[in-house]
Image (cartoon, rainbow, N blue to C red):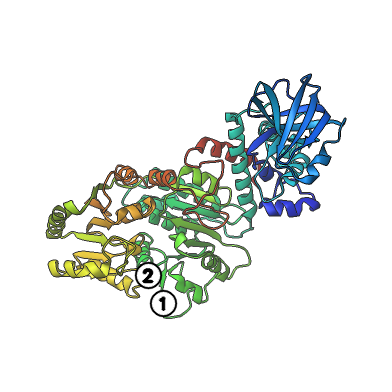
Amino acid sequence: MLSLPSEEGEKFHRLGIGSITALSLIAPTSFEDRRLSHELSANTQCVIDATVEHVVRTPKTLKITFFAHNLECVIEGVIFHPKPYMIHQFPKNERAFFSGKAQWELGKWTIVHPMKISAVGSLIPIYKTPLRIDVMRRLIEKNITIANLIADGLPEVIASELYGIHFPELPKPMSESQLHALKFGELYEYMRRLRLKRRYHNTSYRASGDIRAWMKTLPFELTEDQKNAINEIENDLIAQYASRRMIVGDVGSGKTMVILASVILMQPHRSILMAPTTILAAQLYEEAQKFLPNLRIALVTNATKKGSLEEYDFIIGTHALLHRPLPEAGLVMVDEQHRFGTAQRHALTKLTDNDTSPHYLQFSATPIPRTQAMIDSAHIDVSLIVQTPFTKNIATRIIGKSDFTKLLDHIRFEITQDHQVLIVYPLVEQSESINYQSIDEARGYWEKNFENVYITHGKDKEKEAVLMAFRENGNVLLATTVVEVGISLPRLSTVVIVGAERLGLSTLHQLRGRVSRTGLQGYCYLYSNKSGKNERLESFSTCTSGFEIAALDLKFRSSGDLLEGSIQSGKKFRWADIGEDEVIVREVKNYLAPQKD
């Protein structure tokens, strides 16, 4: 990266940028044409090379008679409500360059509010920034050169296009190639900054487990996406540097098997996995015992008695892992990584008693668009598991008040089939600002008309126990989005999402993913009081892939910001649109690839 002149540092800081490339992305909002005029056009700026022949002051105007050498004619300039000092700006017989708006009135040309100018013969860019306009212009003139942009790492063709945005030969709208250069430059700058955040650490933990032999013992065939992710992880775990990889899989895509395969690969070294809830940790523990029968596996929760974990090959736990001594481990994994704070995730890797870094894998069930994955890969390696072991059959419908009777009939029928129903409410308590019932308002109706109704929400300290009890004995569960990620409910066939238009598409997909976990016919009802067509919900109801839905989410709301820590919402890019510009994202990624450490 090209180092910045120290005297310019404060100006770059005020602009919120840190490189020449970032400076070049601040495009002019307009241009002032300072080229000498060869003819005049009404109500447009003109520039004349003129001699002042006469000046007359009246109570409300200052009139100046010019002889314009470039036009070879006499033109009158007029300034309305002049300040006293202005008369001294037009000494008689002085020849200079003047600019003003040309007007045709009463059969003659006049120039309104003429002013003396010095820079002539070019287009002067106008910038809207925290810096004074002349300071910004000088900053651009000094720093934005093709040579500087190339020295900052950009390809020559992009550097030339960016330079041309600030120093055009003719006034014209921005071209497609210039817009492409702005998008390329913005993505390049962002992905380069992400790469700078990445740290490479030597590791002495090398994978040597026999993954092929283990895969042959499974009672089913893994999907190609699962196999590809396992191969990528295997390559990581035998490398010189500690792995930093994120595995992103849709709901029900079989991430658990990839977790267990990673444990096998890491043999003979120990693996540790942290899950966000006791329920999830317990489910993973059960799966591990089933598919890793030859390994010693421990489950650590707040309820677990403290003792040495040295004898175990695989330790699964909640955040309780952060509060007890852990034995040395070659692989640390975090499931549903977005539900932990950054400090918690880092604490787990630091708590392992190692001289060299363990490998680190994080898993997420919140799909991201391919473009987002390509961008993220500048900071951390990314594997996508798009396929699912079996096709979920979930019917999604948008319903309103008029459909309530039919909905009740459906719920009663599903319960007779020993199936379960989840109803997600937007709030626990009543709110005047939201035109939907809360759980507190609705629970009386459901408890009166149905048996085995369970209730939980985010602030419920017993929510995990409630979910466990509902899984075994419940018919209807009333909850908030606390169930978005978590417990597996094999008998759950129906989810009703109240006020669906208020939730992001990714959240809706996670909630819908709670049903049909074992191949049941599933139903998702999006309940809305809003009349009229909702394009966002209509698009969601016809889409089943979480990765497609993530791309839809980008279409309907701005992308987030990895560098600042949030990737859920908020505008990240000014020029690029990662929902539409996949080709340019790939172009930048490929351009950066040879520079990988």
The amino acid sitting under disc 2 is Thr
**543 or 539, nearer to the observer:** 539
Task: Residue at 60% x, 29% y: name it.
Answer: 173
**361 or 438, nearer to the observer:** 438
The vertical placement of 463 against 336, above or below, is below
The vertical placement of 135 against 404, above or below, is above
Instruction: Tell me, yes or no, if residue 290 can be seen here.
Output: no
Q: Position of residue 354 (x, y in %)?
A: 60, 68
**477 or 381, nearer to the observer:** 477
Q: Position of residue 332 (x, y in %)?
A: 51, 63
Asked which secondary structure carries label 2, the reply is helix
Q: Which residue is mark 1?
A: 302
Task: Residue at 74% x, 31% y: name it.
Answer: 77
Q: CA distance from mark 2 to mark 1?
A: 9 Å
Q: Which residue is mark 2?
A: 278
Asked which secondary structure carries label 1, the reply is loop
